[in-house]
Amino acid sequence: MSKMKTKSGAKKRFKVTGTGKVLAAQSGKRHGMIKRTPKQIRQKRGTDTLAAPDAKIVKQHYLPYSR
């Protein structure tokens, strides 16, 4: 059987740590910053770990060789 392909969009958006957690960028920071408070903008810097159910979906379907 052939190898499964990694979704190219997922490899740009997610990173799997050594312990198996999935990191992703904070949501709500693409546009419309004028509507957000400065505190919200500060808190949405960097990456955040996905919740376990979401991480399971990402690892099973989009990043098959990340275990």
Image (cartoon, rainbow, N blue to C red):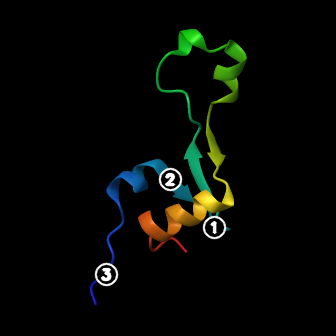
Q: What residue lies at 44% left-to-right and 67% top-to-bottom?
A: 61
State the residue position of label 3. 3
Residue pictured at 32% horizontal, 70% vertical: 5
Q: Earlier in the sequence, mark 1 or mark 3?
A: 3
Disc number at residue 28? none
Q: Is residue 2 above or below residue 19?
A: below
Residue corresponding to mark 2? 14
Location of residue 7 in the rendering, given as x and y in whole percent from the top left corner? 35, 60
> Depth check: 61 or 41 in front?
61
- Which element is circle 1 on? loop
Residue 66, x across and y down, in percent: 50, 70
- Residue at far top of view: 34
Please report the residue visible at 28 percent of the width from the left and 90 percent of the height from the top.
Answer: 1
Q: Which residue matches tag 1?
A: 20
For mark 3, give the secondary structure: loop
Image location (x, y in percent) of residue 21: 64, 61
Q: Residues within 10 Å of mark 1 (few under 14, many from 20)?
A: few
Residue count near mark 2 (Cα–Cα under 10 Å), binned few <14, some 14–19, many ≥20: many
Q: Earlier in the sequence, mark 3 or mark 2?
A: 3
Q: Earlier in the sequence, mark 1 or mark 2?
A: 2
- Vertical side of 4 occupied by 56: above or below: above
Furthest-bottom residue in view? 1
Query: Residue 27 at x, y = what percent?
Result: 56, 35
Q: Amino acid at mark 1?
A: Gly
Q: Amino acid at mark 3?
A: Lys
